[in-house]
Image: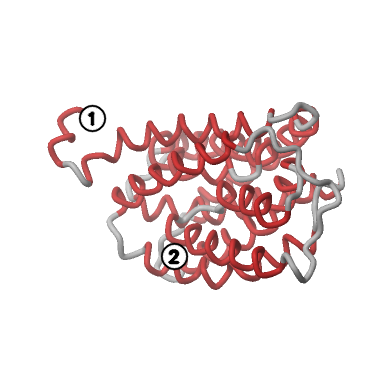
Amino acid sequence: MDSLHYVLGAVSGGLVGFVLGLVGGGGSILAVPLMVYLVGVPSPHFAIGTSALAVAANAAAGLANHARAHHVKWRCGGMYAAAGVAGAFAGSSIGKVVNGEKLLFLFALVMLLVGGLMLKGRDNPGDPGAECNREKAPQVIGYGLGSGLFSGFFGIGGGFLIVPGLVASTGMPMLMAVGTSLIAVTAFGLTTAVNYAFSGLVDWLLALVFVMGGVAGSIAGTRAAEKLGERTGGLTSIFAGLIFIVALYMLWRSAAAFFPSAARLL
């Protein structure tokens, strides 16, 4: 890869960092398509392994910003992440042997489903005092294991599943779920990246420039999240809108994996 690709990698990292700070999981949604379609990484599996590492690092930076703003429930995030790490390892092991374009296509279908569910519940303000007690623990662990499996399989941080999973299992507000989700995004991304790295499917230099761009973007995204979080459904609507836009584009680009006749339209 030449210097232009690495510059594009830094720009992509800035976009991912901004969205991670803004809506938690949006960055993990954008990372793989940016790697493939903007930066020009030729192999979807290489893009997945590299972006998983970059998203984990950017999520950690976003987590620090949200923690300073007191938007993180550490007990809930720790329980969710611990349950999901095993799922992320299993999912990433399966994902490595599945055709890369088919992975992108299936990922886009899941994104459309989750986007619809997010819009359905966008007016739910949540309970700021929600905590992960003994009664809620089975739900938190169950959602964590399931989203970890999806996260590893599709090679993403998994925030697009983690955020609604936290809201559904604990009743916490959207803004608090965004901050808390970054604990699990970091854990799932690192688990997937390590698994892919053992197969030689990580570009370390590209991951580095991606992270450098993402650090600045995450700071701006967190500040924007604080302002938008004051509006009912504001964050949720933006989150769902990003999901739909990226999903439709990915469906269009990867349809040939399942429908060879569609290749002539690309």
Residue 91 x, y percent position in the rendering: 44, 66
Tell me which residue sits at (52%, 51%) in the image: 205
Q: Earlier in the sequence, mark 1 or mark 2?
A: 2
Q: Which mark is residue 176?
A: none
The N terminus is located in which quarter? top left
Q: Of 142 and 250, which appears nearest the observer?
A: 142
Q: Amino acid at mark 1?
A: Leu
Residue at 30% in and 60% down: 98
Q: How many marks?
A: 2
Q: Amino acid at mark 2?
A: Ser
Residue at the disc numbered 2: 92
Q: Secondary structure at mark 2?
A: helix
Q: Is residue 63 left or right of residue 93?
A: right
Residue pictured at 12% horizontal, 36% vertical: 261
Label 1 vs label 2: CA separation? 28 Å
Residue 112 vs residue 130, the one in the foreground: 130
* Left or right of 26 on screen, residue 254: left
Estimate the x, y position of residue 160 in percent, counting from the top left. Answer: 56, 46
The numbered mark at residue 266 is 1
Image quadrant occupied by the C terminus: top left
SS at circle 1: loop
Colouring convention used in this rendered image of the protein: secondary structure
Query: In front: 122, or 25?
Result: 122
Q: Is residue 28 above or below residue 239?
A: below
Horizontal side of residue 133 vs 120, given as left or right: right
Where, by quadrant of the figure, is residue 214 drawn?
A: top right
Asked if disc 1 and disc 2 are in contact, CB closer than 8 Å, the reply is: no
Q: Residue 110's spot in the image, x, y percent?
A: 43, 46
Res. 27 image quadrant: top right
Q: Residues within 10 Å of mark 1 (few under 14, many from 20)?
A: few
Q: Residue at x 46, y 71 (%)?
A: 90
